Image (cartoon, rainbow, N blue to C red):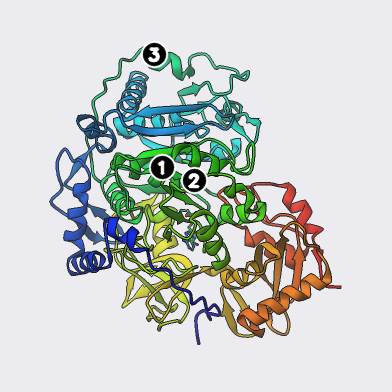
């Protein structure tokens, strides 16, 4: 029996232009050589990449997997990561190069050079030390996307405190649970933050959370909005008051390579927060390597990643990766449509951005908003585009390629996870011929395979479980406070030759050319008349229709077929939610992938339920399709009003 059937067939090929290849770090020949080197001696390969960092004691050992699945990398090395991100640039021409170009939502801006960023990080780190915060302590950071967020992260790293950034959209309950789980003793926050012109009450949320967290001794507050807040005497301090007293020198504390740099909470299947723990040296080596080659990063680049530092993408590819390479990073505080729907394009135009990294959900929103927004800004500085977060449907890929990249920029579709720390599967822009919708091939040094439940390998084009068969440097080291949960969640499902391997939770297939196509989370896979079909493929077919802006597909129990396919569809403006449109879309799916994938029901809706990081919550849709309402946990939902609207969604079923 097949594990997952594939129904998608995207055939177009996009080689990088000769011009791009001639200037890139790695061409096809270079990539072949790098792959050979990595597969001949993965340990030696990664040990060599660790030299991208500055070590106080360089490592001599690579991987130690004697306690597998608990592994270490470079365990005899010692470093302080902020020296790689800051200090070492100060003795070069990067000293007064812009490290951070920041744009606030209301239109204010700040530019910090490497020299200035270093000074600010040292002052904040010295202030933390003065409060008694030390190496090994956990510090929670709950801030808007302002420069102090980056400074706070690096200040923790400077003194060896383990940071845990909580995305600014989370509620006080979420903050409370994470602080308690991490055992954090300090919280760095702001009075408030701006989001679509409104003010988010960050300090207030922290106050609510701390009613239940007596272990927190210090709260440091950045003034961003100037709104009224209450300050708890003895516990709360203003950031400005603390750093004013420091003069900008603070030794970088060397920590062992395996020291936990940060904890990042991610959603699990239970209500208990799951703290993904990342190391210092291994994590940073992985991130340094991938930032360099996947983004083909050069000193002249101006790099803009639209993620929030509250997510792993922001940790790895706004803060650590780009700064390790001395890049200029553009950081934007607000929403893509505030105050207008061309905000990203305006920023690219204004600062001459050369590399742009965003998510498919954002790209589909740009498509819905129309071509006129990118068209009214100059995007000619762009040379490379990237995406991350979910499978990108070919229609969105092609729109991105044409309307943002003007047919000139390679697109790197990067597959990875909070748990992998850095990019695992991706094109290398000067070397890989891309196919819209495929994240192409595993990076050198990364061993990714598709297998059946019993661990036997899938054939070419056969869908299966996506696993990583060899430890990699950026791998999560454990779940904070719960090593057994780490083992069970990631290594409890699949074994190859009796040895547990890391299971990603994704379904995927390699095509005839060895290109990887991610088909979605296996928990979401549809089972229709004995065929297991990935949600991503049916959704991609729907979104390929010109009337459709977004689609999410789920299974509803069906006596006859096992599952019936229910599609929740958002139309582009100007198209009406009629039974005719529904039939049209069903026929479109049949035409595109075959009768087996024909949706039984189309439900039109104005919006889909998403997590705060933009992932569609298919579980909720499954509940709505099955019982008429969402019954499970909805705490990670971004916009509660969407649920209301969904239950009354317009169905084509009588
Ligand atoms: C899951 C991980 C990695 C940073 C943001 C998300 C999906 C991610 C892709 C891609 C297809 C992708 C997978 C993965 N995903 N990137 N390029 N193509 N699917 O991190 O929240 O930990 O989610 O996102 O399903 O397992 P995350």
Place residue 256 in its image quadrant.
Answer: top left
What's the mark number on residue 244?
3
Q: Does residue 642 appear left or right of residue 348 in this picture? A: right
| Front residue of this view, candidates 648 and 11 | 11
Mark 2 and mark 3: span between their CA atoms? 30 Å
Q: Kindly identify the residue that appears in the image at 40 percent across and 72 percent down.
A: 494
Q: What element carries label 3?
A: helix
Query: In the orientation shown, which residue stands out farthest toward the right?
Result: 654
Asked if ligand 1 lies within 8 A of label 1, the reply is no
Is disc 2 surrounded by few (<14), some (14 to 19) or many (20+) residues within 10 Å? many
Percent across and percent down for residue 518 are 48, 69
Marks 2 and 3, the one that precedes in the sequence: 3
| Front residue of this view, candidates 596 and 257 | 596
Q: Is mark 1 on a helix, strand or loop?
A: helix
| Residue contact at pointers 3 and 1, CB within 8 angstroms | no
Marks 1 and 2, the one that precedes in the sequence: 2
Q: Is mark 2 on a helix, strand or loop?
A: loop
Above/below status of 409 relative to 35: above
Is disc 1 surrounded by few (<14), some (14 to 19) or many (20+) residues within 10 Å? many
| Residue contact at pointers 1 and 2, CB within 8 angstroms | yes
Place residue 164 in its image quadrant.
Answer: top left
Q: Kindly identify the residue that appears in the image at 52 percent across and 13 percent down.
A: 233
Q: Kindly identify the residue that appears in the image at 38 percent across and 69 percent down.
A: 433
What's the mark number on residue 307?
2
Percent across and percent down for residue 359 are 52, 54
Percent across and percent down for residue 288 are 29, 49
Is disc 3 surrounded by few (<14), some (14 to 19) or many (20+) residues within 10 Å? few
Asked if ligand 1 lies within 8 A of label 2, the reply is yes
What's the mark number on residue 318?
1
Mark 3 and mark 1: span between their CA atoms? 26 Å
* Residue 51 appears in the picture as rendered: yes
């Amino acid at each position: 029996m097949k594990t997952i059937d594939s129904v998608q067939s995207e055939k177009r090929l996009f080689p990088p232009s000769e011009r791009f290849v001639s200037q890139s770090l790695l061409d096809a020949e270079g990539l072949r050589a790098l792959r050979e080197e990595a597969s001949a001696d993965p340990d030696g390969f990664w040990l060599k990449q660790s030299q991208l960092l500055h070590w106080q004691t360089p490592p001599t050992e690579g991987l130690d997997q004697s306690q597998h699945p608990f592994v270490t990398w470079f365990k005899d090395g010692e470093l302080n990561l902020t020296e790689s991100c800051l200090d070492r640039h100060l003795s070069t021409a990067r000293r007064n190069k812009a490290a951070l170009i920041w744009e606030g939502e209301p239109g204010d801006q700040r530019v910090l050079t490497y020299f200035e960023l270093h000074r600010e990080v040292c002052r904040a780190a010295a202030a933390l030390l003065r409060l008694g915060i030390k190496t090994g302590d956990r510090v929670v950071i709950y801030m808007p996307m302002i420069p102090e967020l980056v400074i706070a992260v690096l200040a923790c790293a400077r003194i060896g405190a383990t940071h845990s950034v909580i995305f600014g959209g989370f509620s006080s309950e979420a903050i409370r649970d994470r602080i308690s789980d991490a055992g954090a003793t300090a919280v760095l926050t702001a009075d408030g933050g701006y989001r679509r012109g409104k003010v988010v009450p960050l300090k207030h949320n922290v106050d609510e959370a701390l009613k239940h967290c007596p272990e927190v001794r210090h709260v440091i507050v950045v003034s961003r909005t100037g709104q009224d807040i209450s300050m708890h005497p003895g516990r709360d301090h203003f950031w400005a008051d603390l750093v004013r007293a420091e003069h900008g020198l603070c030794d970088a504390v060397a920590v062992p390579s395996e020291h936990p740099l940060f904890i990042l909470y991610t959603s699990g299947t239970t209500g208990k927060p799951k703290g993904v723990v990342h190391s210092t040296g291994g994590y940073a080596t992985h991130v340094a390597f991938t930032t360099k080659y996947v983004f083909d990063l050069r000193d002249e680049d101006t790099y803009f990643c639209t993620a929030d530092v509250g997510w792993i993408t922001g940790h790895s590819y706004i803060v650590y990766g780009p700064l390790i390479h001395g890049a200029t990073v553009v950081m934007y505080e607000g929403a893509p449509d505030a105050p207008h729907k061309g905000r990203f394009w305006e920023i690219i135009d204004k600062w001459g951005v050369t590399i742009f990294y965003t998510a498919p959900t954002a790209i589909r929103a740009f498509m819905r908003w129309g071509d006129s927004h990118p068209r009214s800004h100059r995007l000619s500085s762009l040379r490379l585009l990237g995406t991350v977060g979910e499978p990108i449907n070919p229609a969105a890929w092609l729109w991105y390629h044409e309307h943002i990249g003007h047919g000139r920029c390679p697109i790197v579709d990067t597959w990875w996870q909070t748990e992998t720390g850095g990019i695992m599967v991706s094109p290398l822009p000067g070397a890989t011929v891309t196919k819209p919708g495929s994240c192409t091939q595993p990076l050198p040094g990364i061993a990714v395979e598709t297998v059946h439940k019993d661990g036997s390998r899938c054939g070419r084009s056969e869908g299966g479980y996506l696993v990583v068969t060899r430890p990699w440097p950026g791998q999560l080291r454990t779940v904070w406070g719960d090593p057994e949960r780490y083992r069970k969640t990631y290594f409890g499902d699949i074994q190859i030759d009796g040895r547990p391997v890391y299971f990603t939770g994704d379904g995927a297939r390699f095509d005839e050319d060895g290109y990887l196509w991610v088909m979605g989370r296996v928990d979401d896979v549809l089972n229709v008349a004995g065929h297991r079909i990935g949600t991503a493929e049916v959704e991609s077919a729907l979104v390929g229709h010109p009337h459709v802006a977004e689609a999410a597909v789920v299974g509803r129990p069906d006596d006859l077929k096992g599952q019936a396919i229910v599609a929740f569809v958002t139309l582009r403006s100007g198209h009406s939610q009629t039974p005719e449109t529904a039939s049209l879309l069903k026929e479109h799916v049949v035409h595109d992938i075959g009768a087996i994938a024909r949706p039984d029901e189309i439900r039109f809706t104005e919006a889909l339920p998403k997590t705060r990081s933009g992932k569609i919550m298919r579980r909720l849709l499954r509940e709505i399709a099955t019982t008429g309402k969402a019954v499970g946990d909805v705490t990670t939902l971004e916009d509660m009003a969407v649920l209301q609207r969904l239950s009354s969604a317009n169905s084509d079923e009588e």
